[in-house]
Image (cartoon, coloured by chain):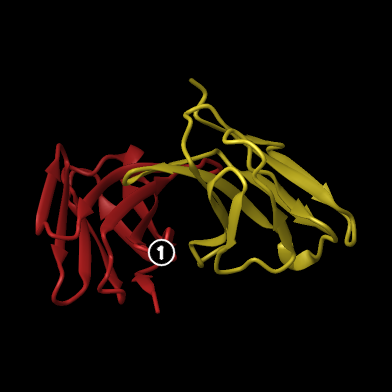
Chain colours: A yellow, B red
Amino acid sequence: NAGVTQTPKFQVLKTGQSMTLQCAQDMNHEYMSWYRQDPGMGLRLIHYSVGAGITDQGEVPNGYNVSRSTTEDFPLRLLSAAPSQTSVYFCATREGYGYTFGSGTRLTVV
Amino acid sequence: GEDVEQSLFLSVREGDSSVINCTYTDSSSTYLYWYKQEPGAGLQLLTYIFSNMDMKQDQRLTVLLNKKDKHLSLRIADTQTGDSAIYFCAESTAGNKLTFGGGTRVLVKP
């Protein structure tokens, strides 16, 4: 049981490039979400999904797209990366009251 | 709206008790959480408290909730050097969202 797996762990992008951050879970949790962590600001919710085929915006959705075609996977897409998207990204699932976080992807946009 | 505030930094001597404080604004919070983050790592759930409880104790950890003042605290007894980390409080509301404070960096001195 791997829990929540995020790939890659580190990524450097040039401004304007696109990429997909992957998140996979093997716990059969319906709820999945993406957060970004910036210094001194805690974690802020980007997008979330309450089940396959359903996604919704969080607090800071601009510049990011998501889709949820399966229960297991919830990829986060940056269509045209900007330096302001330099951050650490965390994927999280939830069942009941309990949230489980992945180990994060550290993204730098230059 | 939701807002969660924490002090930035706490320094404590090994063996003493640490108390980390948090205030929140959303009175509809259902669960309140404490997470620990070590350098370069993801978030580890330490403990949580349901909003209709006043106190919860779990080994060295004591959580106090004052719902009237919207104040949450985490007390760590017999603080060890391994407790040095960033601690985040977070509140969960009915809107499928986990709102984090900015984190308190705890430094344990030998």
Q: Is residue B84 visible?
A: yes
In depth, the one of A54 and A74 nearer the eye is: A54
Report the quarter where the N terminus of chain B lies: bottom left
Depicted A99 relative to depicted B107: above or below: above
In depth, the one of A99 and B34 nearer the eye is: A99
Which percent across, then down, holds residue A8? 72, 37
- Residue at the extreme left of the image, as rendered: B54
Chain letter for the residue marked with disc 1 in the picture: B
Depicted B60 relative to depicted A109: above or below: above
Query: Few, some or many C-alpha atoms within 10 Å of disc 1 (few <14, some 14-19, many ≥20)?
Result: few
In depth, the one of B54 and B96 nearer the eye is: B96
Q: Is residue B110 visible?
A: no
Residue at the location (32% across, 48% down)? B109
- In the picture, measured across the screen, residue B9 lies left or right of residue B12, that is right
The amino acid type, in three-letter code, at marker 1 is Gly
Residue at the location (20% across, 52% down)? B49
Residue tagged 1: B95
In depth, the one of A82 and B110 nearer the eye is: A82
Does dot 1 land on a helix, a strand or a loop?
Answer: loop
- In the picture, measured across the screen, residue B84 lies left or right of residue A35, that is left
Depicted B17 relative to depicted A25: above or below: below
Which percent across, then down, holds residue B28? 27, 70
Q: Quadrant of residue B27?
A: bottom left
